[in-house]
Amino acid sequence: MDEKKLTTQTENFSEWYNQLVLRSEMADYAPVRGCMVVRPYGWALWENIQKAFDERFKATGHVNAAFPLLIPQSFMTKEKEHVEGFAPELAVVTYGGGELLEEPLVVRPTSETIIGTMYSKWIHSYRDLPVLINQWGNVVRWEMRTKLFLRTLEFYWQEGHTAHATAEEAQEETIKILNIYADFARNEAAIPVVAGQKSESEKFAGAKVTYSIEAMMGDTKALQSGTSHNLGQNFAKAFDIKFLDENNQLQYCYTTSWGVSTRIIGAIIMTHGDDQGLVLPPHLAPIQMVIVPIFRKEEEKQAVMEAVNAVVKGLPNVRIKVDDRQGVTPGFKFNDWEMKGVPLRIEIGPKDVQNGTLALARRDIPGRDGKSFQPMQGFETYIPEMLETIQANMLAKATKFRDDHIFDVDNFEDFKDVVENKGWAKVWWSDDAENEAKIKEITKATLRCYAESEGEGICFYSGRKTDKKVYFARAY
């Protein structure tokens, strides 16, 4: 690992992020411009994210399946809004096996079209509904302004696709998934997201309504971290997804789609990271605790390693790494694991063995304040408890940061100051796509989602009376 210090967040947040992703060995740039290689440490984090989601999806009746990467180009033209939304991002295969294809194939940017086609084959009666399928896979969107994890030409994700008999069931599903996403973000990733509906201008191409979870990053920009779409009957009509209802009448299904991608890793990095490196939440961290044995002489080694092995054995449910690398100093190891964001570090040396203690360092509290000496006795109980304390503290810290950087604003001058220099603006808003576009052009801030609101107020931009509040922010 390069021992040169990271660029600090205050110097250049974007450069800090780029350096950190590379130096913590989460990902690297691929030979194809705009693509990334997810390294084992980054993939281990993604696997833990997958596991947490998979459990939640299966607990709510969803099942996993796999659909093809290649989609006939004609499928993409069936749903007008959808194809217009994705047209600039499509990668198209025109040759296969050395021959020009009769019909070009699109590398999936998302799978509504291919899954809709299959649902039209599988669904015949109300007894076949609901269909609740999720797939884990990769998609390609031809982005050229890329940033590792946040926006890459190819990325990994889960995409859920469901079909229902009624509009009410589809809406219930859309909100259920939004709540699963918000629950995961808060309780596993320790990210205090704001969940809400997107504006008409910001919704998914072809959707009736889109909801998202929005996270505030360490530079106060917003990051859309997951979306849930109620597609109404738009895709069902385009792909002929029909069923016979209980009265033997032919009806179109109501469908939904929803997804979270490897972008959530970028959210974790930018919500919690500091100038020393990553800070990973214990629930998801590939390594929850690292043990650094410290000894100089061979006779010290045996006693130290006995203590190390006792700790490992006593914590079967904690993901532990013993760093017994030769030829590097303990200081180098400490910096290395700080860079990688391991939640808890334990140092065990001859004195610790003698005194029956463990030297602990919490990653969420930098410097001396995060260090403590604990008795060896009882570690089986207090270490798992400490990991839970770290998890809770990370959420509390991120929540305070978010709340300190959201401002209630009632005029455009203050709004501009907030979104340019301070954070998110929470405003009364009278829906108007033209005004929304003007605000975006002038300030680079976008309407992130609707906020919970009571009563009525005056729209900060148009002066019209409204009962809606929204969040505006600059975003990734």
Image (tube, rainbow, N blue to C red):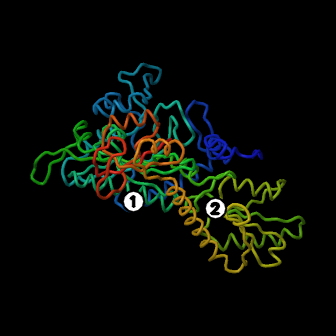
- Which of the marked residues, 1 or 2, is nearer the chain's N terminus? 1
Residue at image point 88% right, 64% down: 296
Query: Disc 2 marks which residue?
Result: 364
Residue at image point 70% right, 56% down: 338
Vertical arrangement, residue 423 with respect to residue 190, above or below: above
Which three-letter amino acid code belongs to the residue tagged 2? Asp
Q: Position of 259 compared to 19: left or right? A: left
Q: Position of 312 compared to 264: left or right? A: right
Q: Do the residues labelled 1 and 2 touch (CB within 8 Å)?
A: no
Residue at image point 48% right, 53% down: 406
Residue extending farthest to the bottom is: 377
* Residue 82 x, y percent position in the rendering: 32, 34
* Residue 355 x, y percent position in the rendering: 81, 78
Q: How crowded is mark 2: few (under 14 residues within 10 Å), some or many (20 or more)?
A: many
Vertical arrangement, residue 279 with respect to residue 263, above or below: below
* Residue 235 x, y percent position in the rendering: 27, 39
Mark 1–mark 2 Cα distance, whole angstroms, equals 32 Å
Query: Disc 1 marks which residue?
Result: 58
Q: Which circle, 1 or 2, is nearer the viewer?
A: 2
Which three-letter amino acid code belongs to the residue tagged 1? Lys
What element does badge 1 sit on? helix
